[in-house]
Image: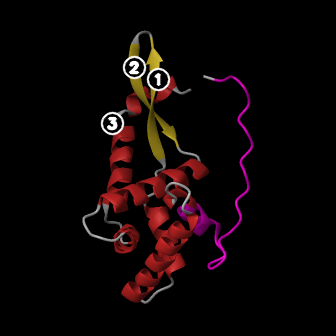
C-alpha cells in the first residue's frame, strides 16, 4: 500500500447534449476499449427511449436512478489480531456515485436482451422506480453493514 498522498481528482467537463456532469460520468463508465463515440450513442439512444417510455425528463429519471442506487454504508475488511472483521463505514458522496453507476451498468449488462440501449434504458427506469438489480445490490450492502454493526468500533 502506498503511503503517498492521493493524486488530485481530474476535473471532468459536462457532456455536450445535456450539459450534465452525471451524464458524462455514465459515458465514461460505459466506455469499453476506448470507443467513446459508441458509448455516447448508446447512452443518448437510451435517454431517448427513457423519454418515450416515461414521458418525463430523462435527465431527472437518471438522477433519480443514481440516487436510489447510491449506498450510504459499506463494509470493508479489517484485520485485527489474526481475524478479519467486516467493518461498516460511511460512503463518501463521490465514491457512492461511482458505485451506483458501476452497479447500474453491471446490472444492465447482465440483463437478458439483445441491445445495450434497451437494457440500459430499462435498468435506469427500474432503478428510478426503486426496483432492479442495482437497487437490490445497494440494499444488500446496507444489510451487510447493518449485520456487522457490532464491529463499528474497529474503524480505520
Give the percent coordinates (x, y) of residue 120: 39, 69
Label 1 residue SS: strand
Q: Kindly identify which residue carries mark 3.
A: 147
Give the percent coordinates (x, y) of residue 76: 46, 32
Secondary structure, magenta segment, majority class: loop
Q: Residue at x 47, y 76 (%)?
A: 61
Q: Residue at x 53, y 52 (%)?
A: 98
* Label disc, if present, on residue 78 of the rendered structure: 1
Q: Residue at x 63, y 79 (%)?
A: 17
Q: Is residue 90 above or below residue 55?
A: above
Instruction: Tell me which numbered mark, 3 or 1, is placed earlier along the sequence.
Output: 1
Q: Quadrant of residue 1?
A: top right
Front residue of 13/135: it is 13
Instruction: Tell me which numbered mark, 2 or 3, is placed earlier along the sequence.
Output: 2
Q: Kindly identify which residue carries mark 2.
A: 84
Give the percent coordinates (x, y) of residue 153: 49, 26
What segment is highlighted magenta in the picture?
A: 2-27
Amino acid at each position: 500500500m502506498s503511503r503517498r498522498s492521493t493524486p488530485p481528482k481530474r476535473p471532468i467537463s459536462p457532456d455536450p447534449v445535456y450539459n450534465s456532469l452525471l451524464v458524462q460520468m455514465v459515458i465514461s463508465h460505459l466506455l469499453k476499449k476506448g470507443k467513446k463515440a459508441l458509448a455516447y450513442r448508446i447512452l443518448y439512444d437510451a435517454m431517448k427511449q427513457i423519454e418515450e417510455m416515461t414521458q418525463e425528463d430523462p435527465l431527472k429519471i437518471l438522477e433519480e436512478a443514481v440516487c436510489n442506487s447510491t449506498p450510504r454504508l459499506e463494509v470493508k475488511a479489517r484485520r485485527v489480531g489474526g481475524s478479519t472483521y467486516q467493518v461498516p463505514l460511511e460512503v463518501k458522496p463521490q465514491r457512492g456515485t461511482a458505485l451506483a453507476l458501476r452497479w447500474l451498468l453491471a446490472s444492465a449488462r447482465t440483463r437478458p436482451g439483445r441491445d445495450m440501449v434497451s437494457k440500459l434504458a430499462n435498468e435506469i427506469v427500474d432503478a428510478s422506480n426503486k426496483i432492479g438489480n442495482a437497487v437490490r445490490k445497494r440494499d444488500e450492502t446496507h444489510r451487510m453493514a447493518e449485520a456487522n454493526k457490532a464491529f463499528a468500533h474497529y474503524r480505520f
